[in-house]
Amino acid sequence: MTDTRPPIRVVVADDQTVVREGLVLLLGLLPGTEVVAAAADGAEAVRLVAAHAPDVVLMDLRMPRMDGVEATRLITGKHPGTGVVVLTTYSDDTSVLDALKAGARGYLTKDADAAEIARALAAVRDGATSLGPAAQERLVAALAGPQPKPRGDSLPDGLTVREGEVLALIAEGRSNSEIARRLTIGESTVKTHINNLFAKTGVRDRAQAVRYAYRHGLATPAD
């Protein structure tokens, strides 16, 4: 049966121009989807929602002036007919919980494919919730309570718990695909964590990363 409903009207909010324009292009190719506006920060997203009354906002979390969590809170409070799907590269549990507490009904990582995004938009437009597999894992973990940090209560150079886990697995000689399977995340997410931890620690390759892991107690020699 042909779907005769009007298209899902979407506002895209992301501070990175290349990401924002890429999302607009991608959504424009999805049948039954219409991008009505695009915002470079949370404050602009709130203004555009008031102006266009979209069905869904595809919302980045980390943006200047007003972040995605605060923008979500304002949008869902003032415009209950508009649903919010959070789209982010970040994997910390606090972001998931804060966004959901603020009223978001969908959560996807930026490695989501077109089909996942389309399903999330449709679900949220219809009043349901939509959490991607990686987001579900993190949400369950967060609700279960604090997870133990790898080898100590504090990590050097601002590494997150997940980055510490990835670094420890690199030190074990694991490939990206093996790390992805071990942590139940996508390979693209593993690559993002590796890029972030390389930048934070100043290492240039895996060999240096292994030395860093051993030097800082994130890995120990096998027995």
Image (cartoon, rainbow, N blue to C red):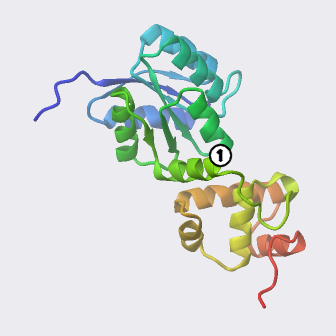
**Residue projecting furthest to the right:** 215
At horizontal 48% and vertical 13% (from top left) the residue drawn is 79
Q: Quadrant of the C terminus?
A: bottom right
Horizontal arrangement in the rendering, residue 177 relative to residue 29 (left or right):
right
At horizontal 88% and vertical 69% (from top left) the residue drawn is 216
- Residue 142, given in percent of the width and then of the height, sits at 64, 48
At horizontal 51% and vertical 49% (from top left) the residue drawn is 136
Residue 137 visible to an observer of this rendering: yes
**Residue projecting furthest to the top:** 51
* Secondary structure state at the residue bearing disc 1: helix
Horizontal arrangement in the rendering, residue 90 relative to residue 204 (left or right):
left
Placement of 182 over or under 197, stated as above or below: below
Q: Nearer the viewer, residue 147 or 7?
A: 147
Q: Which residue is mark 1?
A: 93
- Residue 13, given in percent of the width and then of the height, sits at 54, 27
**Residue projecting furthest to the front:** 144
At horizontal 61% and vertical 60% (from top left) the residue drawn is 191
Residue 16 visible to an observer of this rendering: no
- To which quarter of the image does residue 195 belong? bottom right
Name the residue type under label 1. Answer: Asp
Placement of 171 over or under 94, stated as above or below: below
- To which quarter of the image does residue 155 belong? bottom right
Q: Nearer the viewer, residue 38 or 135?
A: 135
- Residue 125, given in percent of the width and then of the height, sits at 36, 27
For label 1, the crowd category at 10 Å Cα-Cα, with few meaning under 14, some 14 to 19 and many 20 or more, is some
Q: Nearer the viewer, residue 24 or 100?
A: 100
Q: Quadrant of the N terminus?
A: top left
